[in-house]
Image (tube, helix red, strand yellow):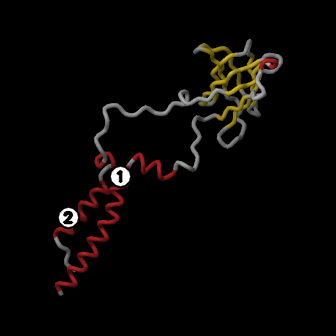
Amino acid sequence: MKISRGSKIAVVLAALAQVLPCQATSAAPTSTPPAAPSLRSATVIGDVTLRPDGRLQGIVVDASGLPLPNIRVDVTQSSSLIAYSVSNERGQFTVPITRGGVYQIEAGGSFVVCRLWSAPAAPPSARPELLIVAGGATLRGQAGMYNWISEHPWCFYTVLATAIVVPVVIISSNHDDDSSS
């Protein structure tokens, strides 16, 4: 079987495209990389009712819903630490709060903004306790391969082009050999 010079060059170029790092095949980087999404910028404010004794009650869990013991829970307002607590063996915590208002609660790498209400003033939608899912952002199965492809399009298209070019070159070289015989 004789392979033409053009076929050899195409195979070598396709193989090099596989070996080179993805950055070498992608567009030039921008001068400033895009900022990572911040949990603080995408926060939804929730309403929570304080207990009658003026305490915030809650539970810290991981992404699978299991309670997390010994997690420090910080309550801040206007960047000042108001109070803190540590979750017990069942992940539960209580923090003394002197009055209602908007507070930031941090625990286990998660950040939550809450409007805390005294029991008589709380709206009907206010929850009796705060649920904090520790560990930052939770990734679900929807991300998958599509996000990787959208973040690395040139890598994906290089692999796709190689998957098309190599068989075409091999088949065309086989046809060239058959016609020369």
Whether residue 140 sits left or right of residue 49 in the image: it is left
Calculate the distance from the C-alpha at mark 1 to the C-alpha at mark 2. Answer: 20 Å
Q: Position of residue 67 (x, y in %)?
A: 72, 37
Q: Position of residue 138 (x, y in %)?
A: 59, 40
Please state which of residues 140 and 116 is positioned toward the viewer in this rendering: 116
Query: In the image, what residue occupies the spot 76% across and 24% down?
Result: 123
User: Outermost residue, front direction?
Assistant: 124
Task: Tell me the amino acid under the disc marked 1.
Answer: Cys
Which residue in the structure is indicated by mark 1?
155
Which residue in the structure is indicated by mark 2?
9
The quadrant in which residue 13 appears is: bottom left
Q: Quadrant of the C terminus?
A: bottom left
Task: Tell me the amino acid under the disc marked 2.
Answer: Ile
Query: In the image, what residue occupies the spot 51% across and 30% down?
Result: 38
User: Outermost residue, bottom direction?
Assistant: 181
Q: Secondary structure at mark 2?
A: helix
Q: Quadrant of the N terminus?
A: bottom left
Query: In the image, what residue occupies the spot 46% across and 33% down?
Result: 36
Which class describes the residues within 10 Å of circle 2: few (<14), some (14-19), or many (20+)?
few
Please state which of residues 107 and 151 is positioned toward the viewer in this rendering: 151
Say above or below: 53 vs 17. above
Query: In the image, what residue occupies the spot 78% across and 27% down?
Result: 124
Please state which of residues 37 and 58 is positioned toward the viewer in this rendering: 37
Say above or below: 26 vs 134. below
Which class describes the residues within 10 Å of circle 1: few (<14), some (14-19), or many (20+)?
many
Say above or below: 129 vs 179. above
Q: Secondary structure at mark 1?
A: helix
Q: Position of residue 118 (x, y in %)?
A: 78, 17
